[in-house]
Image: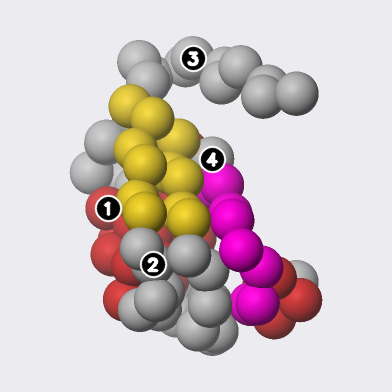
Amino acid sequence: MLEKLRDVEKLTFSAKFLQTLSLALALGRCPFPSVKVNDLTLETTLSSVEFPGIEKLLQNSPGVKKLTLHVMEPGTVPLLNL
């Protein structure tokens, strides 16, 4: 699925995605493609469970020009930007 997103201009990833990515990395089950994105937003609780996913995502996004962190309290549901 991420292969299809590799050339988009802007991406937003949720805390749940970052947690899932971290778990998949820990299990050794996650080939992660490079992402050519300029504007990257991470909705995160900054918990240690998310750190491996954040690290891998940043490593594989070398062209990021703008990084935005939306730090949320654990259990918070992010607002939709319509």
Q: Which residues are magenta?
A: 6-13
Residue topped by disc 2: 64
Taking the image as shown, residue 22 lies to the left or right of residue 82, namely left
Q: Residues within 10 Å of mark 3 (few under 14, many from 20)?
A: few
Q: Is residue 57 above or below residue 78?
A: below
CA gap between label 4 and label 1 equals: 13 Å
Q: Position of residue 23 (x, y in %)?
A: 45, 59
Give the SS element for disc 4: loop
Q: Residue at left 54%, top 47%?
A: 13
Residue type at the position of mark 2: Val
Reading the chain from its start, which is encountered first: label 2 or label 3? 2
Q: Which mark is residue 76?
A: 3
Contact between marks 2 and 3 (CB within 8 A): the answer is no
Q: Nearer the viewer, mark 4 or mark 1?
A: 4
Seen in the image, is 47 located left or right of residue 25? Answer: left
Position of the N terminus, as image quadrant, is bottom right
Where the C terminus falls, by quadrant? Answer: top right
Residue that badge 1 annotates: 51
Question: Which residue is label 4 attached to?
Answer: 14
Question: In this orientation, which residue lies closer to the viewer: 28 or 78?
Answer: 78
In front of the other: label 2 or label 3?
2
Of the image marks 4 and 1, the number of the one nearer the N terminus: 4
